[in-house]
Amino acid sequence: MKLTVIGTGYVGLVSGACFAEMGNQVYCVDIDQEKIEGLKKGKLPIYEPGLDALVARNHTEGRLHFTSSLGEAMTNCSLFFIAVGTPPGEDGSADLQYVVAVAKEIGSLLDSYAVVVNKSTVPVGTAEMVHNAIREQLDQRGVQVEFDVVSNPEFLKEGAAIDDFMKPDRIVVGTESPRARELMYQLYAPFNRNHERTIYMGVRDAEMTKYAANSMLATKISFINEMAGLCELLGVDVENVRRGIGSDSRIGFSFIYPGCGYGGSCFPKDVQALIRMAQQVDFEPRVLQSVEQRNQFQKGWFGRQLRRHFGDDLSGLTFGIWGLSFKPGTDDMREASATVLLADLLAAGATVLAYDPVAMETAARELPAQWFASGQLRLVDNQYQALEGADAMLLVTEWKPFRNPDLDAMRRTMKQQLIFDGRNQYDPELIRSAGFGYVGVGRLV
């Protein structure tokens, strides 16, 4: 099959490469000509394990194409995936201007039956908006062309996106059109050979499913973080509580790891957008609001612990940060807990040495220039260099190279032997027996 994917960000590029891997002819379209030229040369705009090789192989073998011309990509094509960004607006709602712009361009060029697929995360009712935008352009042209709009949300985890796409837990397809359903069935048939993973439902149902899924996972994280805060005050070790409740099959162990808050491009944005959707129909989303409030509070965990130990003025103190991305396996720093921590430390006068295995270029590009210009923040070449003269090590992102560190090397390098574990990665007894002070999230002091 031939299909067009509009948008070469995280969702679009992963989707396009994986569809091409299954033998389809895929045209990835983006208005950023520099990005398109880079992709043709194998330069990816994002980091995702295995994606560079997947893109290179399918491009070399002639199944994956890159262009800035939607008209070129639309020739003899009947499947169009909209995978552009939907950033949060000032009120938390999803900004749909890019989705609508793509819909209008499709409508200005469409000349035969097509299925337009919303792959971007969009609010309930967006498919109708896309349908109206395309129909308006067709009417202006004075042509009659049949088309359907389908919702096919992505469920990709950054750091494991290729496996998630190639071996999905489920494929959600929202459509009321038998013709569109048949095309989507053919497209996803190679992904269903082991067993049928596709769940068909109404368009609005599919749109809601994506938001409900991410909000449920965010709720689990905020719940266990709230339990961790309570455990700290009651003299309870939350790690034991986590294992105790996670062994219940109705709860499970996924997403009940206490820490310094969730981030990324999905959970924060989607929870806020669902809150806004609820408010627009005069529904008070009390649970969702609490999830969001708890997460914002949790991102200040480091600051509260450091002030408790060192006082409000952190001038003259140096802190080594391990991890800047919002989670392991990605260079994405959007809504990352590390950015909240950095702002807090620098405002209090501290000096910071920071290291991340993957996100250093992202940090240098996206963090405020004045943080570097002041000399308070320095990005270093490895995790132990971040501890030179440090008064404490702050674990923010639980990358694998950080899991079993050389404690002897840390002891020789650090000024004070103190670890603040924002992901409860370490065994407190082991760390303390090596002569370090240890502070975890909801762990016994």
Image: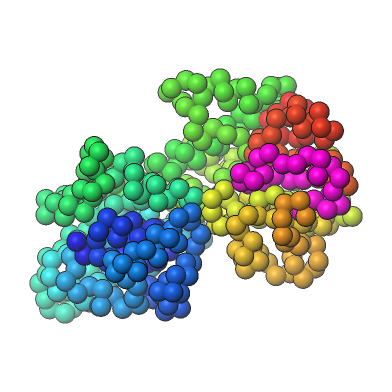
Residue in view at x 75 percent, y 41 percent: 406
Q: Quadrant of residue 420?
A: top right
Left or right, residue 50 beside residue 27: right
Left or right, residue 134 beside residue 278: left
Q: Give how far across and how far down residue 218 sits, in percent.
A: 50, 40
Q: Quadrant of residue 237?
A: top right
**Residue 13 visible, this orientation:** no
Residue in view at x 46 percent, y 78 percent: 34
Q: Give how far across and how far down residue 178 sits, in percent.
A: 11, 50
Q: Quadrant of the N terminus?
A: bottom left
Q: Quadrant of the C terminus?
A: top right
Q: Is residue 368 magenta?
A: no
**Residue 381 visible, this orientation:** yes
Q: Give how far across and how far down residue 61 sits, in percent.
A: 31, 67
Residue 309 versus residue 121 in the image, above or below: above
Region of the chain picked out in magenta, as a range: 386-413
Residue 262 versus residue 32 in the image, above or below: above
Left or right, residue 21 beside residue 43: left
Residue in view at x 70 percent, y 70 percent: 369
Tell me the colour scheme of the image.
Answer: rainbow
